[in-house]
Image: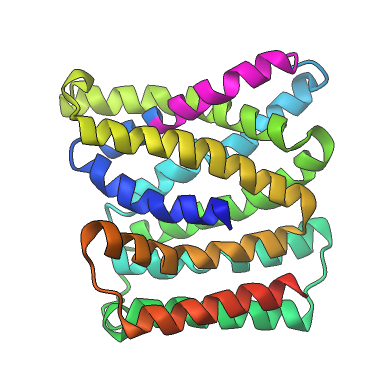
Amino acid sequence: MTAAFLWAVSFVAVKVALDAVPPLVVVALRLAISAACFLPWVIAMGGTRGIGGRGLGRLFVLSLFGTSLHYGTQTIGLQYTTASNGSVYTTTGPITILLLSALVLGERITLRKAAGVAVAVTGVLVVMGAETLGAFELGNIKGDLLILASIVMWGLFTVFGKRMTDELGALRVTAWVTILGALTMVPFGWCEARAAGFEITKTPVDAWVAIAFLGIACSFLATLLYFVALGLSESQKVGVYLYTIPPMTAVVAALYLGEVITINLVVGAVLVIAGVALTERG
């Protein structure tokens, strides 16, 4: 739940950062900061000792699904489709995890888990409200497919991340995934900065604070907590907590940006929490 809360706050932080910094540069800096946080632990744990070349390759693929390629694909997709489409598609994430975990890990989809997911989805749709859902259109197919692809990547990241967590431990997997993701993303961020004529030295203080929060609290702490939870529970149960992000984001936006807390938010949040509780007991 703590990881979900930090990710909920991240949407506000991203909005602040994007006012002054190009999107891929934000992702690159975010991952670079979180990688720096993990680096001392990686050194203390002996680097690649006990992982081997094959294990490092699996971690690299995992880092693409959960960090660089996932964030990059999602960002590019949002340039070609509407925000309404993107927000609706993100609600399919835990469903993707539910199906992939059943296919790959053999986790059983019980009636209670399915009911919990249904209740949680209903809660998210209530939070969005009729106006947002009414604005949903089939936009540019390229953007829609990229958003859906990024969600499938996160599902694969969660499912295969659990398997590697069982083998190597949550801290080690999270550290290497973040570091490898940063190494992959930094060149793309550098190229975007060059193409856009962006000078990092002119980044305002509030943007740096937002990026630092994204790197330390979200990509470092939240991702670590997410993997620890994967090591202690089924990926289906962990994944459903992602449904709590939209209501919490709305609350944070109301407090920080002055947005109004509507009855849709209150009713939807209750449904989301009920759905999570039902799935957790499944």
> Magenta segment: does it hold 7?
no
Percent from the top left, x then y, of residue 116? 65, 79
Does residue 37 appear to the left or right of 259 in the view shown? right
Q: Main secondary structure of the magenta part?
A: helix
Percent from the top left, x then y, of residue 243? 53, 67
Q: Quadrant of the N terminus?
A: bottom right
Which residue sits at x=63%, y=72%? 276
Residue 33 versus residue 67 in the image, above or below: above
Q: Quadrant of the C terminus?
A: bottom right
Q: Which residues are magenta?
A: 30-47
Judge by depth and name the residue closer to the eye, 272 or 168.
272
Does residue 111 appear to the left or right of 152 in the view shown? right
Judge by depth and name the residue closer to the eye, 165 or 92.
165
> Magenta segment: does it hold 32?
yes
Quadrant housing residue 140: bottom left
Q: Is residue 178 visible?
A: yes
Residue 282 versus residue 222 in the image, above or below: below
Q: Is residue 21 visible?
A: no
Quadrant housing residue 264: bottom left
> Which colour scheme appears in the figure?
rainbow
Does residue 212 appear to the left or right of 160 in the view shown? left
Which residue sits at x=72%, y=50%? 230
- Of all residues shown, which one is farthest toward the front? 255
Which residue sits at x=47%, y=39%? 217
Percent from the top left, x then y, of residue 65? 57, 43
Percent from the top left, x then y, of residue 108? 82, 70
Which residue sits at x=53%, y=24%? 37
Count of numbered marks: 0
